[in-house]
Image (spheres, helix red, strand yellow):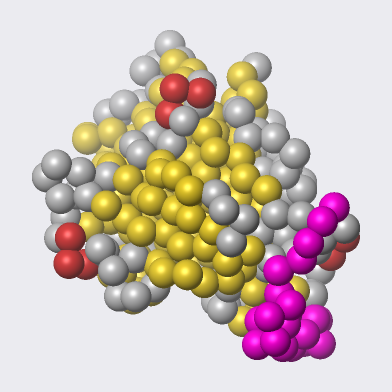
Amino acid sequence: MSLRPVKRLTSSRPTLEGAGVRLRRAFGFGDTSETDPFLLLDDFRNDRPEDYLAGFPWHPHRGIETITYVLAGTVEHGDSLGNRGAIGPGDVQWMTAGSGIIHQEMPKGDERGRMHGFQLWANLPAALKMTPPRYQEVKAAEIPLVGDDDGTIVRVVCGRYRDTPGPVEGVAAEPMYLDVTVPAGARKTLPVDTRRHAFAYVFEGSGTFGNASPPLDVPTERVGAGASGGPPAAENRSLVLFDGGDEVAVSAGEAGIRFLLVSGLPLREPVAWYGPVVMNTQEELEEAFRELENGTFLRKGPDA
């Protein structure tokens, strides 16, 4: 077994999206080669309704899948296919935009005004860019929890942890999407297929990843060596990008650590990307926006 070393540790960046939603972007709208097949990860976490209520009004998508995971508050959604609904704490919506869909997502806070969730964009391979749109909407009760003897708890959204499969199926990149909580002071290793690109996004507590002993208090901004000469602590809103190997190791800090662990098979295809549309060539991208202008973006029937 070989542990995956940390290739890069960075902090998510404040970003304004939609109609004025303040969020943090872990990665996106840049070079996608290291995160392939994933394109973007946003952390929308706010306690002030004025920072998120404007939401994400009607906008198109083509050529990708969007994965929305809610921890607090709700996200109400609607689309050009006539679907309507809401996802709440612990729920996941996995939307395959495929050939094209127009939708909106409007966040609402909980009784204390809090809103927290994540949106991950996964690329579709060229052969599936124009597949018919579909949804996999999974309620919190359907997502299995796996508890290990050391106190670690893993929510399995997609893929498999140990012998437990997640409820999301039939996704091109065969992704693994886990919500992992490791208790204070514990060291944990988690299997990850060597063929995959993998990253962790820390959203509670802190810890060190890779072949490291329990962390010291090292600021997230220190991406070089930690105070003891080892790797620095990955703290709240840190993105940890891993190099190759078949296991990820984490040592939790004094408050424990909770993070998303995501991996997928790289597509290794060209990416032509503008806003919410991701194709393989510039010509395909231009055609998509021409169709938006002339009203032919949405396809009909089984050959959409």
248, 40: nearer the viewer: 40
Task: Identify the image quadrant of the C terminus.
Answer: bottom right
Lateral position of residue 93 relative to residue 175, left or right = left
Which residue corresponds to the image point at 63% horizontal and 64% vertical from the top-left? 101
Lateral position of residue 182 relative to residue 262, left or right = left
Q: Quadrant of residue 186?
A: top left
Total numbered badges shown on the rendered structure: 0
Q: Quadrant of residue 31?
A: bottom right
Instruction: From this view, report whether residue 263 is shown above or below residue 66.
Output: above
Lateral position of residue 127 relative to residue 161, left or right = right
Which residue corresponds to the image point at 30% horizontal and 75% vertical from the top-left? 20
Q: Position of residue 11 (x, y in %)?
A: 36, 64
Instruction: From this view, report whether residue 43 is shown above or below residue 73.
Output: below
46, 198: nearer the viewer: 46
Instruction: From this view, report whether residue 304 is shown above or below residue 142.
Output: below
Which residue corresponds to the image point at 87% horizontal and 58% vertical from the top-left? 303
Looking at this view, name the residue that lies furthest to the top: 149
Residue 178 is one of the magenta-drawn residues: no
Q: Position of residue 242 (x, y in %)?
A: 57, 53
Task: Identify the image quadrant of the N terminus.
Answer: top right
Question: Would residue 138 be seen by someone viewing this image from the given angle?
Answer: yes
Magenta residues span: 281-302
Which residue corresponds to the image point at 15% horizontal and 60% vertical from the top-left? 48
Q: Position of residue 6 (x, y in %)?
A: 53, 54
262, 168: nearer the viewer: 168
Residue 287 is one of the magenta-drawn residues: yes
232, 201: nearer the viewer: 201
Q: Position of residue 34 (x, y in %)?
A: 64, 64
Lateral position of residue 298 relative to residue 187, left or right = right
Question: Would residue 243 be seen by someone viewing this image from the given angle?
Answer: no
